Each structure stands twice: as structure tokens, then as C-alpha cells.
């Protein structure tokens, strides 16, 4: 019990922060939002997966990936392919020249299902693909880059290039991928209608549970020696190397783990939104994910969730009234975060949050350390 | 392959050239067990490059480096460390955002793989070793201090401690007393004399007073070649050394 409390929750402060977040997204949102808005929040929360992954990768590991959309997209497309195949049964598609294949394939004169679509007839294989393929892809990229000691801005550019390549590939190979429109018109999951309100509620809660689980798992990693090593690699890579570690393996691992998290987010996106398209894969969404993490505070797993929610609420509100200004606003926000509050919302909370908590709890409390230090300290008491 | 020796470190015919410039030129150098050897020489003599070559940071153009009869030139950096070679950098190279305890813990030579580090437990054995090392480097009261808040001298000691905890057979220190106060220099000299028992230590240093206090043997490097070698007195009275390095 003590292990769970100290390691996963991060002690008292970490537990409080986690419970507040859990209450907000698990109780308050479902109670006070109608299903349309809740579904929207659910969509935002799927972006929180890659944002959390960037806290691990970028905040702690110092590895800036501008291509997390790739992994989000792979997860999303994996799920969409399964749903599309189910929606393309022979009865549903009997007006096509080749019934039983997805409609966009038929429009593109394909007469049989491409081989790489076959595994997506099975839900088990689809889930395995969502969990394994993006991580395996990240392993290949990571091994190629980190073993050669490519890092920093070069790595960021390469991940961005990969995001572009994947987008071009998806758009260009319309017959195999659905092209620019993506994979649409998804209806059922193993015969269960996913467009109903009850399905939306269920997906929302599955999504939240997965997100909270990912946060706990990430905390477990960050409070282990691996977590300290990540910080050490970020700050003094050579010292770690000359302390007998093969630094590249550590970078590859965290990159693969971040890909896995992002992919889960992508799959949940498809389930809740009902389609997947290349506009969630390329440069813009990838950079947005970095902004979510930066605004939330790149050293705070929970902050990343708030950052994602805040930006997306802002995006929805602003783009309804001033659509052309939104991109400038977001750019300005990113610059001001970097310049004026580099620790994002989590940093603001650490600096000024005690004014709020003091008002609620009359007891005098001294200002506590920032969460990551608390997380670090906690494993001393656990030992 | 040349035959095995009793030396901790045997460097033979070592050459490295950067675009034709030979930073180290057919160097032969031997280090005995339990020996504290200081390398001195003017700027650009190739002192740091020699350390870089031994620890694998720079790859040699030709020649051999044998550590306990194991060839190092083909090994990667972390393999060389695991073989028992520790190296301290010129500027203190510690993890400023972590505590002294965490700095030492990361350097503790277990859990060096990804899985190992995820499963690593801070056992009483680990803590004991950390405490022991911390008192050796005079930081036993600062275990919970963030390393970035230490004084310059303490940072140097911490980095030495991070190497000691790995119990290397060969310890290489690049200017360990640079920027230290007189008192800290004295303490460092004591520390080095203490830790050189049971292992070989190779030090690069400019401070002649300090060198005199610690060195068993001194080698003077000049333009990538050995100019003179021997005990301190011999070296100090060598006319060539006076000419190029110590001054008239």
C-alpha cells in the first residue's frame, strides 16, 4: 500500500493533484455537461495522451519530438480500419462493384482487400496492432537516431519530416487509406452501435480510465531510478554515458513508451469522434500537442491534461467567433509560456496555488515543493 | 597484439590526428597498480585528448590502449566504464537538478540497463555504500542538498565520489583542483592520497604545488609527445621541461 501511495501517487501532494483531476473529469464533467459537450471533452482528453507522452519524452528526457501526431495517427487509423471493415460488410456495400471492401477502395478501382488490411478484421489483432506497431515504429526511428547520437533540434526536425511523409503517404494512397477525407462513416464495434449516447458515455469513461492509468504508470516510471536517469541524461548526457550506461537504450525506451501512449489516445479518438483523417497526423497537430504539454507545464503529467483542456476549450470558444485569429493567439500563448512562465500551469499552481488552498484550508501550511521534487523525495521515504 | 603485462594501463604507439594535426603522436605510457601519476604540460599538449582516448570519447587513429590487458580502443564508452575505468571531466559534470544522494545513486554500478533501472530498489546496501562514499568526499551532511547548490569545490568532490562509488581500477581526473580554495586543495590532496590505495589514478593538473603534494610520478607532455617523465624532482630539474613549460 505504501508502495502504491508513494510511488504511483507521488505522496500527499501528488495524490491531491491526482484526485482533483480525477474528480473533475470523472464526476464533475459527466454531471454538468450534456452528452454533446462531454463527447467534445472526451475528444480533447484523447489529445492529453500525446501531451502526457511529451512530458515524459520532452520534459524529463529532453527529447523534443515534433511528430507525436504520427503515433496518435497510427493508433487512430488502426482502430478506424477495424471499424471500417465492420461497416463494409457485404450487405452494407452491395451497391459497390466489389461488395465487402471499404467504399473508398471501391471508388479507387480496388477489387480486393489489400493484405495489410486483413489483420484488422480481428479486434484482438487490431488492439495488438494499436499497442505494438507505433512502439515498433518508434523503436526503428529511435534506434536509427539515438544509436548514431542524433539529438536535439535534428531529432525534432526528423520527427517532423516523418510526420509530413506519413501525411503525404496517407493522402496520396487514397485507395488504401481513404486519402484526404480519411476513414469515415464508422458505425459499429462488434455489432454495437458506437454512435448512440450510451456508447459515447461508455467510451468517455474508458478514455478517462485509460488516461488516469497512463498517468499512474508514467509516475511509476518517473519515480524509479529510470526517472532520475532521464533527468540526468537531459542535463548531462556525457556524464551518464561515462557512468557506464548505454544512453541510447534509455532514449529508445522512453520514445517507444511515448509512442504507445499516443497511439492509445489516437484509438480512443477514433472511437469517440467516429472517423480518422490525415489532419490529425501531420505537423500542425504534432506541434499543437507540444503546446498542450508546454502550457500545462512540461514537467507535470497532470498539468499536461489541464493544458490540453484549456487550449482546446479556448480553441473551440475562439474559433467560433474569431476563426482567423485563433492560430495567432495560440502562437502568442506558446511564446508567452516559453518567455514568462516556462513551467506552465503547473508552475503557476506551485507559485500561487497556495493562496487558493490556504483560503480553503484554514490550517497554516508552508509552501510545498514543486510536484516533481516531491515525486523524487517520495522514493527516499519509500526505501 | 602485444603480450600481457602487469601494468594497469599500457598505452603503446598511440596516435590520433585531427585533419592531419597529430594531437597525440606515437605515445607510449605505462601506469602501475597503486600508482598516482600526474600528467602536466602546456596548453594544447594533448593531455585531455589522452584521457578522451582512454575513456573512448575520442577514437584513436592507430595504436593500442590496454587496461588490465584488455584492449580499450575497440570498446564503446559504457563498456570501458564497466570494465573499470572512471573519468572526471574538467568542469564539474554532475546532475545539478538532483540531490547529492541521487547523484551518487545514479552512479552506483547496478541497474545499468533499462529494465534494471526500472526495477532498481534503494536497498540498505545501496544506502550504506552511498553514505560511505559521501563521508569519503566530505559531503555526508549534504545528501539531500540539490547538487546545483553545492560550492564549486564540493561539486568537484561529488564528481570524484560518483566515480569512487563504482570502485574503478583506474581513476582519471582532469584538473581536479581548478578553481578551488587553498583549504579545499589541501583536502583534495588528502582525498587523492587516500583513494589512490588499491587503484591507479591518473591526474591532469597545472598547479605545481598540488602536483608536488600528490604525485608518485610525473609525465610532461608537449605537442602530443612525452617530454620527460620521472619523479617530481627529476622533472622539475629537467632543462627541456624548464624551457617549454615551467619557465626560467
Image: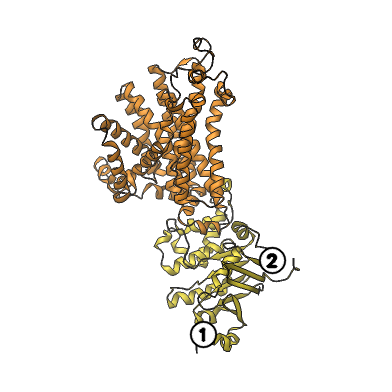
Mark 1 vs 2, N-terminal side: 2
Q: Position of residue B115 (x, y in %)?
A: 58, 45
Q: Which image quarter: residue B232?
A: bottom right
Residue at screen point 44% across, 36% down: A69
Disc 2: which chain?
B
Neighbours of disc 2 within 10 Å: few (<14), some (14-19), many (20+): some
**Placement of A88 over or under B93, stated as above or below:** above
Disc 1: which chain?
B
Q: Would residue A208 be visible to someone looking at this image?
A: yes
Q: Position of residue B77 (x, y in %)?
A: 59, 58
**Placement of B126 over or under A168, stated as above or below:** below
Q: Position of residue B245 (x, y in %)?
A: 52, 83
Residue under label 1: B246
Front position in the image: A98 or A20: A98
Front position in the image: B162 or A82: A82
The chain coloured orange is: A
**Placement of A75 over or under B177, stated as above or below:** above
Front position in the image: A334 or A18: A334
Residue at screen point 42% across, 68% down: B152
1 vs 2, front mark: 1
**Placement of A154 over or under B228, stated as above or below:** above
Indicate how the structure is coloured in the image: by chain
Q: Helix, strand or loop at disc 2? A: loop
Which colour denotes chain B?
Answer: yellow
B72 displayed left or right of A189:
right
Front position in the image: A261 or A339: A339
Q: Position of residue A192 (x, y in %)?
A: 47, 15
Residue under label 2: B68
Same chain for labels 1 and 2? Say yes or no.
yes
Q: Helix, strand or loop at disc 1? A: helix
Q: Residue furthest front?
A: A109
Amino acid at each position: 500500500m505504501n508502495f502504491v501511495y508513494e510511488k504511483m501517487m507521488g505522496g500527499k501532494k501528488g495524490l491531491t493533484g491526482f484526485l482533483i483531476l480525477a474528480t473533475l473529469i470523472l464526476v464533475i464533467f459527466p454531471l454538468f455537461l450534456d452528452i454533446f459537450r462531454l463527447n467534445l471533452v472526451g475528444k480533447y482528453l484523447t489529445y492529453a495522451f500525446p501531451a502526457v507522452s511529451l512530458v515524459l519524452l520532452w520534459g524529463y528526457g529532453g527529447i523534443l519530438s515534433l511528430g507525436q501526431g504520427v503515433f496518435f495517427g497510427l493508433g487512430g487509423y488502426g482502430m478506424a480500419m477495424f471499424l471500417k471493415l465492420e461497416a463494409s460488410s457485404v450487405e452494407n456495400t452491395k451497391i459497390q462493384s466489389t461488395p465487402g471492401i471499404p467504399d473508398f477502395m471501391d471508388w479507387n478501382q480496388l477489387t480486393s482487400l489489400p493484405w495489410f488490411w486483413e489483420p484488422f478484421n480481428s479486434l484482438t489483432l487490431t488492439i495488438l496492432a494499436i499497442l505494438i506497431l507505433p512502439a515498433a515504429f518508434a523503436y526503428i526511428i529511435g534506434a536509427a537516431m539515438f544509436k548514431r547520437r542524433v539529438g536535439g533540434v535534428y531529432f525534432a526536425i526528423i520527427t517532423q519530416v516523418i510526420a509530413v511523409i506519413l501525411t503525404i503517404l496517407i493522402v496520396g494512397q487514397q485507395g488504401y487509406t481513404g486519402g484526404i477525407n480519411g476513414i469515415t462513416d464508422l458505425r459499429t464495434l462488434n455489432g454495437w452501435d458506437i454512435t448512440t449516447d450510451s456508447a459515447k458515455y461508455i467510451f468517455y469513461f474508458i478514455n478517462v480510465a485509460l488516461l488516469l492509468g497512463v498517468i499512474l504508470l508514467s509516475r511509476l516510471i518517473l519515480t524509479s531510478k529510470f526517472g532520475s536517469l532521464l533527468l540526468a541524461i537531459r542535463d548531462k548526457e556525457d556524464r551518464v554515458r561515462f557512468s557506464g550506461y548505454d544512453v541510447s537504450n534509455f532514449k529508445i525506451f522512453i520514445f517507444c513508451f511515448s509512442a504507445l501512449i499516443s497511439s492509445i489516445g489516437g484509438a480512443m479518438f477514433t472511437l469517440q469522434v467516429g472517423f480518422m483523417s490525415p489532419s490529425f497526423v501531420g505537423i500542425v497537430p504534432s506541434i499543437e500537442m507540444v503546446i498542450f504539454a508546454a502550457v500545462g507545464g512540461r514537467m507535470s503529467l497532470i498539468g499536461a491534461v489541464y493544458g490540453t483542456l484549456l487550449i482546446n476549450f479556448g480553441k473551440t470558444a475562439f474559433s467560433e467567433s474569431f476563426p482567423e485569429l485563433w492560430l495567432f493567439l495560440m502562437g502568442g500563448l506558446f511564446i508567452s509560456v516559453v518567455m514568462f512562465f516556462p513551467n506552465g500551469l503547473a508552475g503557476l499552481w506551485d507559485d500561487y496555488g497556495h493562496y487558493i488552498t490556504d483560503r480553503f484550508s484554514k490550517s497554516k501550511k508552508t509552501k510545498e515543493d514543486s510536484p516533481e521534487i516531491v515525486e523524487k523525495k517520495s522514493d527516499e521515504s519509500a526505501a | 597484439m602485444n603480450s600481457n603485462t602487469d601494468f594497469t594501463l599500457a598505452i603503446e604507439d598511440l596516435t590520433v590526428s585531427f585533419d592531419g594535426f597529430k594531437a597525440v603522436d606515437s605515445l607510449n605510457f605505462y601506469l602501475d597498480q597503486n600508482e598516482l601519476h600526474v600528467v602536466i604540460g602546456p596548453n594544447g599538449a594533448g593531455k585531455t585528448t589522452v584521457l578522451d582516448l582512454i575513456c573512448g570519447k575520442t577514437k584513436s587513429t592507430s595504436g593500442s590502449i590496454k587496461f588490465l590487458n584488455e584492449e580499450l580502443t575497440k570498446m564503446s564508452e559504457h563498456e570501458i566504464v564497466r570494465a573499470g575505468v572512471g573519468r572526471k571531466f574538467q568542469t564539474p559534470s554532475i546532475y545539478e537538478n538532483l540531490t547529492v544522494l541521487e547523484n551518487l545513486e545514479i552512479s552506483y554500478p547496478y541497474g545499468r540497463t533499462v529494465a534494471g533501472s526500472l526495477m532498481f530498489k534503494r536497498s540498505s546496501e545501496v544506502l550504506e555504500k552511498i553514505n560511505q562514499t559521501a563521508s569519503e568526499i566530505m559531503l555526508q551532511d549534504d545528501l539531500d542538498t540539490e547538487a546545483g547548490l553545492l560550492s564549486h569545490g564540493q561539486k568537484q568532490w561529488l564528481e570524484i565520489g560518483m566515480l569512487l562509488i563504482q570502485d574503478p581500477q583506474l581513476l582519471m581526473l582532469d584538473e581536479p583542483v581548478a578553481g578551488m580554495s587553498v583549504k579545499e586543495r589541501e583536502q583534495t590532496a588528502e582525498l587523492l592520497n587516500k583513494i589512490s590505495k588499491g587503484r591507479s589514478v591518473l591526474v591532469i593538473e597545472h598547479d605545481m604545488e598540488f602536483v608536488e603534494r600528490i604525485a608518485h610520478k610525473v609525465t610532461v607532455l608537449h605537442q602530443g609527445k612525452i617530454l620527460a617523465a620521472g619523479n617530481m624532482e627529476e622533472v622539475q630539474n629537467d632543462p627541456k621541461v624548464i624551457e617549454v613549460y615551467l619557465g626560467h
